[in-house]
Structure formats: structure tokens, C-alpha cells
Image: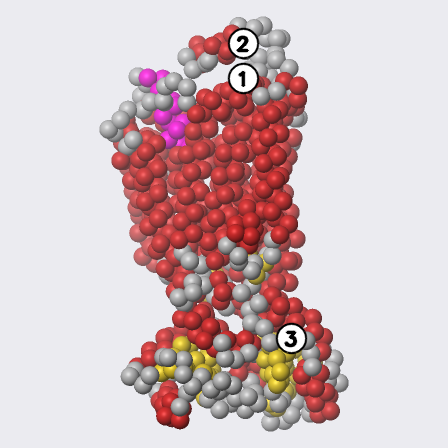
Amino acid sequence: MFAALGRVVINNPWKVIAAWVVAAVVVLAFSPQIVSVTSNNNANFLPSGYESIKAQNVANKYFPQQSGATGSLVISTAKNNVLSQQNMSTIQGLVTSLNNAHIPSVAAVQTSPQTFPQGFLSPNGKVQLINVAFNGQPGDTGVNQAVKTVRDDSTAFLKNTGLVSGLTGNASISVDTTNAYSSAEQIISIATLVLILVLLGFVFRSPIIAILPIFIIAVVHQMAQALTADLAKAFNFQVGSELAPLLVVVMFGIGTDYIVFMLFRYRERLVKNKGERTEKGLNEALTVIGEVIAAAAGTVAAAFAALLLSSLGSLRTLAPGLIVGVLLMAVAALTLVPAIFALLKIHLFWPSKPKIPEGPSRSQRIADVVSRRPGRVAAGFAGILIVISIGATGFKPTYNTLAELPSSTPSQQAFNTMASAFPPGTLGPTQIYVTSASGPIDQAGLTNLVTKLSSTQGVAQNGVSPPKLTANNTVALVQVLLNQNPYSTPAMNDVQGAIRSAAHGSVPGSQVLVGGTTSSLVDVRTALGHSMTIVFPVAIIIIFCILALILRAIVAPLWLLAGVGLSFLATIGAITLVFINGTGYTGIDFSIPIIVYLFVVAIGTDYNILMSTRLREEFNNGREPHDAVHESVLHNAPTITTAGMILAGTFASLLLTGIQSLEEIGFGVAIGVILAANVLSTRLVPAIAALRGWRFWWPHKRHEQTAPKVADLVRLTPMDVTKAKRPAGAEQKSGPGSS
């Protein structure tokens, strides 16, 4: 299949390139921007059956002014003094000005709410809050623009008054999150480009090889973004803001990997068969590596497809973009890349010539150790992974998206000012909706609800508002201030436990629903737990099936997946040790386990596929197990370590973003890739193959051993030549004792 594809591509390079140019122009010209289908609102990603969504639906219908995005404009003096009467007059003037401006998507601006007894002036008199109610949900285009207008107008109004303002709340947090991720994408893109230039230039000593992948992957990346936006529009879904930066590192990482896979095999063929036409060497390389790239891309895409089963929309909607990106990159690697290589011929490697470093190389030393002492290698590196995995026992998730943003974020700064003077729950009150099944609400029951909530764990002192009823008294709203940051785990536990328990069933004949930011996060946590129980096993089953088909074996895939699973646990252990024990973070972003799992399992399997297919090739060529391992590691270790270095580097660029969740993803996947490339694929898997021998490939039967070809003898060590002279039945025993 790939031989035929290679002939078509290599014999018609201009046609292939022209087809890609036309496709790119059409896709980029007629597709929407990815930002037009991006949202940061967790509620947008929850199924309709969750309590917070049911509560939101009641709010939208009966209390539209309280149902939209919220904001708190935090006013204080520049020197943190007590607010004077003149200051208060200025603040009231600001409220009047904002209301008179009739800002689109702003429902109301007020400083004297009836919601809470203590009002919006802090007990120490230093901070005044202005409540801003929006028409629409966090992340809506109109709300985003209104946040910017409110901030700009407030700053302009308070200029030269000695007062400063800051806007926080879910509307502004959504805007700041979008801006932070946009800046992160730019940082990642620059860092990734520099990394690829430097590493490819260093490895291949060719400016063409260093620059070419960047242009190819950049075009394919833009096409993937556009096609993802098309899918989102066509199937009416939104994607989370984390997709854009993740798509950059995924596509540049795996795209460079696939090109590196091709380059190393192409160079090996040219060096091995000096004087043969480059087209033949390229076709032979594509024939072998094409299977690896297709299998690797299929494995990664299949793992990402498992996200489609998640009940959490923010994870589920990551899948289409990542799948499109991976598959499109694979198609480019199998068609566009070899077409360009065919045109450049030997000049691809200019100014150097294709050559493999002579003398004892690092890969030669690795191959010697792994093939001669597989038992010690397997035990040693498995032990390292197990020790690091112990750190995973200290893993603690966090749902505090505000704290994950850089400290310079306007919402973060405004919240810190507010938290210094008000109960932390002021940032996001919890709304409790009471809906009568028939007739007016039972007033005694409603009073009982307020009384119970006032003494419930997690509720701030004087934190329960008087009920607000509809005109026909059939629906009521009770707002509750929490005594914890509404984004914190303690607040989530209180809402999920004590507060929901106190609310449910407290008003006879009525349905009571708990809504608001914290309730939404509680439901996100529940949905995530459900998703993990589905996504984890499904991804493993899919990957196992693909590996079994590729390797034509049952035992080998089991060993590979066991190793990848151990690498995942070691990765989570490393993340926990660094970010909780090292930097002092209170927790790890809640999405990290499932995202890192998919990346480490899927991408780590890429390198295992490359090594395992070479091992199978050498076994089938009649080599003894230890010799087959030596040959496989010798030729594939440079490819895997180079590809791993580039991929780990691209993910490590996420550490530059200042966003906690991206830092954790970047560090975690980088560590996972390093472990996969330098521990699992180049040492642990070959060592196990040497120990198990043909049993590693069960039920695939052993081939009759044949003498190595003359061309193979050119690259054999003296030890290999001696073994090649042995009779066919003199196979070295492979087992634990042979290490």
C-alpha cells in the first residue's frame, strides 16, 4: 500500500504540492476563525441533566436579570485609605454614568443592593463594590465587549480622582482567560519554532531541513484550525480556550516527529545504498515509515476519539480539533513531505551529505547494554518508574480557574482587593431557586429554608438574602454568600454536601435547585469523574486493538501498554512532586490526569510502534533475539531520542505561559515524552523483547533463521559477525538468566 503511494507521490511531486496549495487556499478562505467557536463558560459544557444547569434554566426564565454573567467593580483609593464622602459621591457618579451610557449587554449597575444586609461597602470602609449585571453568559461576544467597555469607562471616569477600579466576576474572568490563552498561544508558537530550528539544524546540519518542517506544519496547522471551526459550526458545538495552544504543540510536536521518522530512515537508505537514485531510497523509506506514521497517527487519533465519550463538554469538544490536526498532519507527512523531498533530492541535506556518525555512538552504547544485559536494564528502569510513581499518591485536584491565571491578570488583582475586605464568597454568590409545583410557594417552608441555610456549614455570617419572589409567588430566588472562595475545593464540598442537603426538600410541594458558579463546578467535578471511568479504559482498548493489528501479536501490545501505563503514573507522580511539593500549589488542575493520560499513552505509543515494528522486522529477518534488539536500538534510538527531544521541548514551551493549567500540562507531557523516548521505547521495551524472545510476539510464529545479507554485514559489529556464522539452530537462549 505505502509502496504504491510512494510511487505516485514521488513520480508526481508537483501535482501533489499543487493539490495541497489549492486545498489550503480553499479551506483558509472559506472557513470561520477558531475564536468564533471558543468559550470559557463551564456551564456551556455540562449536560442538561445536572442540577446547576436546571437551576440556570429556571433563572433564565424567571429572573433574567440575575441569570446572566456577573461582575463586581471593585473601587478603592490608590493609597488604600478609608473612602471619604467625596469618594462615595464620585463612586455614585460613576454608577450613574455607566447606567446612562446604556452599554450593550449590561443589564444594570448598582451600589445599593437589597441582596445582602451588609451592602456593598466593606466593614473597614476601604472598598466599595459596584454590582454589574450582564445580559448573556460568560464568554458571549456581547458580554466580552461589555467587560472591556465597563473597564475602560470606569478607568476614564476615575482618572485624577485618587480612586482606582478593577472588574472581577465570571464575566471578566472569562475575558481574562481568553486573553491569557491568546498570549500563551503566541509565546508557544515562537518558542516552538525556535526549538525546532535549533534542534533539527543541530542534528542534520542542514538549514533546509531546519526550516522546511516549520513552513509545512504551519500551513497544515492553520488548515486544521479552520476545519475544526467548520465542524463546530456544522454540528453546533463550542470548543474550550485551551484547544488553540494545545493544537499548536500537538501539531508541531507530532508533525516534526513524523518528518524526523522519515528523515532518519531516508538517510539510512541513502548511506546504506550509496549511488542508488534518491527516488528509490525515498520510496523504500516511505514504504517502511509510512506504516509507522499511519499507525502512530491512528493510535493518537483513536485515543483522542475516546474524549467524545466524555460527559464533560470541555473535554469532548477537544476531540474534533485534535483528531483533525493529527490525521491532517499524517496525510501531509505521507504525501506533501515526500513530494517536497523528491523535488529537493540530495540537496535536502545541503550543505552536508547524508551520513551516519562513525565510531562508538551513544546509540551504539545503549544498544550494547540493552542487548547484553536486558534483565538488569528492565529491572533498573522499571524500578525508576515505580519510584517516581509513588509521588502520584499525593495528587490533589483544584477547580480554581481564577488562581490558575497569572497574578497580573486584572480579574485576579480585583479579586485580591475585594477578598481583603469582604467575605471571599462575594465573588460568586450561590443562587437557590424554589419552584412550586402548583400554586403559590409555601411561605412557612420558604422561611424554614432561609433559617436552615443561615446555620449551614459553608455559609457566611449574614450571608443569606431575603427571598425574591415572582409576581405570582410561584418561584423564589434566595442568594447565599459562601465563607470560602467560590472556586475553591472547600466551597465545592460545602455546596455539594451541606448546602444542597439543607436546600433539597425544605419547601413542601416545591422543587429546590442550587445554582451558581460553585454548583456548576461541583457538577463539572462529577462529570469529570464519570468521564474518567469511560475514557481511560476505552482509550486503552482502542490502542491495544491497533497495536495488535500492527504488530500481529497479542503479548507484545500487553507489554507495551503496561509500560505506557507505568509511564503515565510516573508522570502524574512527577507533576505532583514538582507543583504541590515543590512550588507549593494547593492542587493540580482537575483536567490534568485525563489530558496527560491521553497524550502520554497515545504519543508514548508512537515511539513504541517505531521501535516495535523495527524489532519485528529484525526478528523476521532471522536474527537472534539479542541481535535483533541490538540492531533495532542501534538504528532507532537516534530517531526516537531526537523526536522525543523536539516533542518534549514543544510541550515544555507551555511553561512560559504563566497559566497554571498549561504549565502543568506542558511539564507533565514533556516528562511523559522523555520517559517514553529515553526509558520505555529505547530501553525497557527492547530489554523485554530480548528476555522474552519469540514469546514476545505470540501468537506470531518464529521464522526460520537465515544468514544476514552481505549488505547487512557492513553495519554489524564483530560480535554480530561471529554470531552470523553460527548454524541456524544455535540460537542464544533468551530469558531472565541471559542478562
Q: In the image, is residue 502 above or below residue 466?
A: above
Q: Does the stretch in magenta take in 269?
A: yes
SS for tag 2?
helix
| Residue type at the position of mark 2 | Lys
* Marks 2, 3: nearer the viewer: 3
Q: CA distance from mark 1 to mark 2?
A: 9 Å
Percent across and percent down for residue 259 are 38, 36
Marks 1/2 in contact by CB < 8 Å: the verdict is yes
| Picture quadrant where residue 15 is located | top left
Magenta segment main secondary structure: helix
Instruction: Report the residue marked by disc 3.
Output: 458
SS for tag 1?
helix
| Picture quadrant where residue 692 is located | top right
> In the rendered structure, which disc, 2 or 3, sits on the residue that comes first in sequence?
3
* Marks 1, 3: nearer the viewer: 3
Residue 539 in sight from this viewpoint: no
In the foreground, 736 or 438 = 736
Image disc number at residue 627: 1
